[in-house]
Image: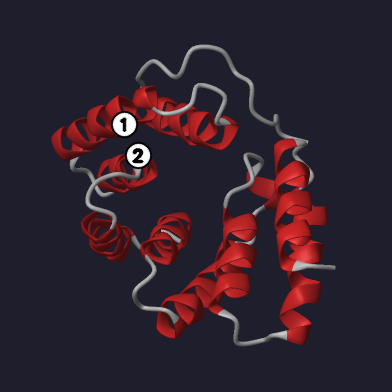
Amino acid sequence: MTRWYMDALAGVYGHQGKYAQAQALFRESLKAKPDSPEILNDLAWYLVSPPDPRQRRPQEALQLARRAVKGAPEAAAYYNSLGLAEYRNGLWDEAVATLHKSAEMSKGSEPLDFLFLAMAHWARGDKAEAEQYFKRGVDGASKREANNWELRMFWAEAAERLGKPGPPGRDFPSSR
């Protein structure tokens, strides 16, 4: 299976809420290329991003994301995945530092950095900082494609965490 096809199929699975199937695709690819930062990051993402917490594997994702960043330290998206993995593992300070690096590397263009920063700051008790990052994330998310279900899903998660209004509509996978 080509890398493009696998990524596309994993994306379809994710959109359908079939994270286990997406994870299986990346696990299979990782057998062939165990040190590929791209595959390590993709698997880490699908282990840490399901909407249903019972489907998440944050400890495994953390190890994979760290390996991905080590293998490709210039990839901002890998820091974003690592930051989410750190957040999901309760490593608030590490998540904040990593997500700041991701935001700096992507020149502030990735709303997920700010939504994850909002949740990490909120978790460590920095409510005012959390609200500022939430606003920045929502501003960025609002300018993006309206049908980006994954962005909307994380926007809704951050909104729920901070007690704020979420995105209009709910067209992302539900917990399964």
Q: Point out which mark residue 25 bears.
A: none
Quadrant in the rendering for residue 24: bottom right
Q: Nearer the viewer, residue 131 or 11?
A: 11
SS at circle 2: helix
When the figure is inspected, residue 155 is found, relative to residue 17, above or below; the finding is: above
**Distance of label 1 from label 2 (alpha carbons):** 5 Å
Q: Which residue is mark 2?
A: 111
Colouring chosen for the image of the structure: secondary structure
Quadrant in the rendering for residue 99: bottom left
How many badges with numbers are in the image? 2
- Looking at the rendered structure, the kind of residue marked 2 is Pro
Quadrant holding the N terminus:
bottom right
On the image, the x and y values in percent for residue 47 come to 64, 59
Relative to residue 127, is residue 174 drawn left or right?
Answer: right
* Residues at circles 1 and 2 in contact by the CB criterion of under 8 Å: yes
Relative to residue 163, is residue 136 drawn left or right?
Answer: left
On the image, the x and y values in percent for residue 95 come to 32, 60
- Looking at the rendered structure, the kind of residue marked 1 is Gly
* Residue density around tag 1, few if under 14, some if 14–19, many if 20 or more, within 10 Å: some
Instruction: Residue at 70% x, 57% y: name it.
Output: 7
Relative to residue 70, is residue 147 drawn left or right?
Answer: right
Instruction: Residue at 79% x, 67% y: name it.
Output: 2
SS at circle 1: helix
On the image, the x and y values in percent for residue 93 come to 25, 62
* Residue density around tag 2, few if under 14, some if 14–19, many if 20 or more, within 10 Å: many
Q: Which residue is mark 1?
A: 140
Quadrant in the rendering for residue 105: bottom left
